[in-house]
Amino acid sequence: MTMESNFWLTTTSMPTASPGDLPSHVDVIIVGAGFTGLSAAHALAKRGTTVAVLEANTIGWGASSRNGGMVLTGLKLSAETLAKRYGLDLTRRMYATSLESIDLVEQLVREENIDCSFSRCGHLEVACKQSHFDAYARSVEVIAREFNHQLRIIPQNQLGGEIGSGIYFGGIVDETSAGVNPAQYVSGLASAALRAGACVYENARVQNIQRSSQNGSAGFSVLTSRGSVFAQNLLVATSGYTSAATPALQKKIIPIGSFIIATEPLAPDLARELSPRNRMIFDSKHYLHYYRLTPDNRMLFGGRAAFFPETKNTIHRSAEILRRDLIEVYPQLRDTKIEHAWGGTLDFCFDTMPHAGQAQGIYYALGYAGHGVAIATYLGTKLAEVMSGVKTDIPYAVIPFPGAPFGLYNGKPWFLPIAGAYYKVLDWVS
Ligand SMILES: Cc1cc2nc3c(=O)[nH]c(=O)nc-3n(C[C@H](O)[C@H](O)[C@H](O)COP(=O)(O)OP(=O)(O)OC[C@H]3O[C@@H](n4cnc5c(N)ncnc54)[C@H](O)[C@@H]3O)c2cc1C
């Protein structure tokens, strides 16, 4: 097995970043060159705004090139949970954004000619217990009635048409969801932003942000590892990699590892047997597995095998656990070679919700909790509209953005082993 090797990155290269030194002044600085930052940069540059994207590593280095490429409807939390917490009106607006965000990805892919295997293949959620399957009926009914969106229940005796595994109790299909090659998509977004006139600087780690003014206009002075830049507006788009450069946000984000393995390419017949409709598949557990075929027929299988973010150690350990779990789902793959294993960091907020808005003058969008391919693109684009003075409804900007209970968190997630154990127990009992 090739450890620490992201399969997606073998399928593409990232565009060349902007040459030369950092400018001394731009209209907008964006911190982070992933889906959020690059979609914002693209939308701003198209409006004629001068933009510098400052990326600590390289274009697409973060979760945006490492994920499962599942472009999913809905949010991380169920519609029922959202409605209980925020009321029906706000939940309707949130659910609508989850659908609009997939349309937006599709539109960007089409308009910018991004070759990234985007396909509306639909998703399949599979029930690990009878009780999980029993709850699907109510969920589907609520989503149809309140959000006018149709899902389809697949009883256990028809599941064979959707998945070549015998361990599940039934499923739900949503035909609206899509799949994408995420590294090709983030590379294409970066190219589109650069073509539109945005500048993207690599190895430019933001170290410090100060309010200041230049030539009578208020803004931010941003110190990076490559020098300083001033801008009127600043967007933080650092997701699970949010650091002490933005301490107030760092205290609200819990970085959690998620890991993926990919097999060697499978024979077409075997691939069709495992996933007859080529869906984006995930199961109903808290410690969930997500899996799909890649465009070249590998089985890509992911999960939160270790809770801590990616290191050589956590990737190695996770790869072993994921291989074991993969064979439980698909015994047909017992002798199949695993060729790739990698990890990335998810950004969970304490309420498991995305948040986008402005605090102390700084714009931010994060908290995608492993459900960010579409909504990160959407929120980056929406915040670009806001910064351009367009009146825009962002439901995630009006909900409370909680920090840790009793303030017991400084950005170092000491409680992850406890949380990991808690969710494992929850999966046994619920
Ligand atoms: C293994 C894995 C699987 C996933 N699977 C899915 C999936 O199938 N479907 C789905 O919808 N979502 C999935 N996600 C989540 C999704 O990938 C993310 O929500 C999304 O990519 C977030 O994009 P982003 O642009 O906000 O952040 P990122 O892509 O993480 O980019 C943040 C960038 O900020 C940079 N940065 C951080 N600090 C600084 C600094 N101080 N200065 C400059 N730059 C800085 C980092 O280097 C990084 O490149 C998955 C995530 C992971 C890790």
Image (spheres, rainbow, N blue to C red):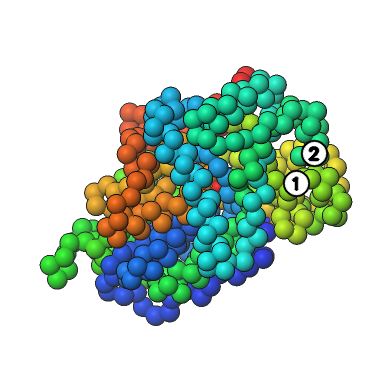
Residue 256 visible in this rendered orientation of the protein: no
Side of 16 where 31 appears, left or right: left
The residue drawn where x is 77% and y is 28% is 156
Q: Which mark is residue 161?
A: 2
| Residue 125, placed above or below residue 378 | above
The residue drawn where x is 55% and y is 31% is 144
The quarter holding residue 275 reads: top right
Counting from the top left corner in percent of width and height, residue 197 is at 40, 74
Tell me the quadrant of the picture where the C terminus can be found: top right
Counting from the top left corner in percent of width and height, residue 93 is at 41, 39
Counting from the top left corner in percent of width and height, residue 391 is at 29, 52
Q: How many marks?
A: 2
Q: Which mark is residue 168?
A: none
Q: Amino acid at mark 2?
A: Gly
Residue under pointer 1: 277
The quarter holding residue 168 reads: top right
